[in-house]
Amino acid sequence: MKEGIIKDKEDIYYLTLEEFRKAVNHGNLDYQIIIKRKEDYETYKKLTPPRVITSEGEIISGEYDTGTIPQGALVGIPVSSGVIEGRARVILKLEDAVIDKEDILVTAFTDPSWTPLFISVKGILFILFFLN
């Protein structure tokens, strides 16, 4: 940053390790790369992933019968048996997670980056939010 090659310290996160090395060692950086990747990031943030993707890449979709759900009820899908008790922590974004080992994680969906969090909680509850 002192050399004026990188404008903002956060810009390094938009570079590969090799691109970063070139910028540091040789002062060589095409700033259009960072601008393009920032634009791409903003686009990607707005995407909604499919609910289910198989290991073969098939996207599975379907509809839930919401006609019998009482007004104001939270709907989840059971995936294993058992009963646990604990404080429910609603976490919608991984970076907002503040979890204790006795907590129950409540969220709409996860991806592989959430895996380390799973060993830190007592249980996980996926809630499906329906908009009427």
Image (spheres, rainbow, N blue to C red):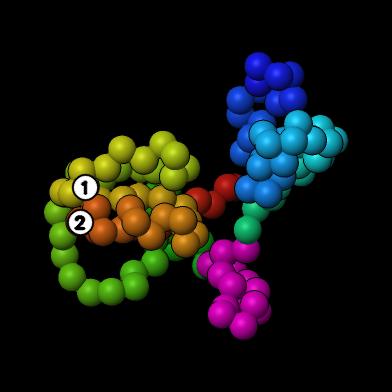
Decide: few, some or many residues near mark 2? Use Cα within 10 Å; few <14, some 14-19, many ≥20.
Answer: some
Q: Which span is picked out in magenta?
A: 50-64
| Residue 43 visible in the shown view | no
Between 117 and 6, the one nearer to me in the picture: 6
| Residue 126 visible in the shown view | yes
Q: Is residue 35 left or right of residue 88?
A: right
**Mark number displayed over residue 22:** none
Percent position of residue 74, x then y: 39, 51
- The three-letter code of the residue at mark 2 reads Lys
Between 123 and 3, the one nearer to me in the picture: 3
Mark 1 element type:
strand
Q: Which residue is mark 2?
A: 122
Q: Is residue 26 left or right of residue 80?
A: right
Asked whether the beta carbons under mark 1 and mark 2 sit within 8 Å of each other, the answer is yes
- The three-letter code of the residue at mark 1 reads Asp
Q: Residue at x 59, y 47 (%)?
A: 132
Q: Which residue is mark 1?
A: 103
Q: Tell me which label, 1 or 2, sits earlier in the chain.
A: 1
Q: Is residue 132 left or right of residue 7?
A: left
Between 86 and 24, the one nearer to me in the picture: 24
Q: From the viewer's perspective, is residue 77 above or below residue 31?
A: below
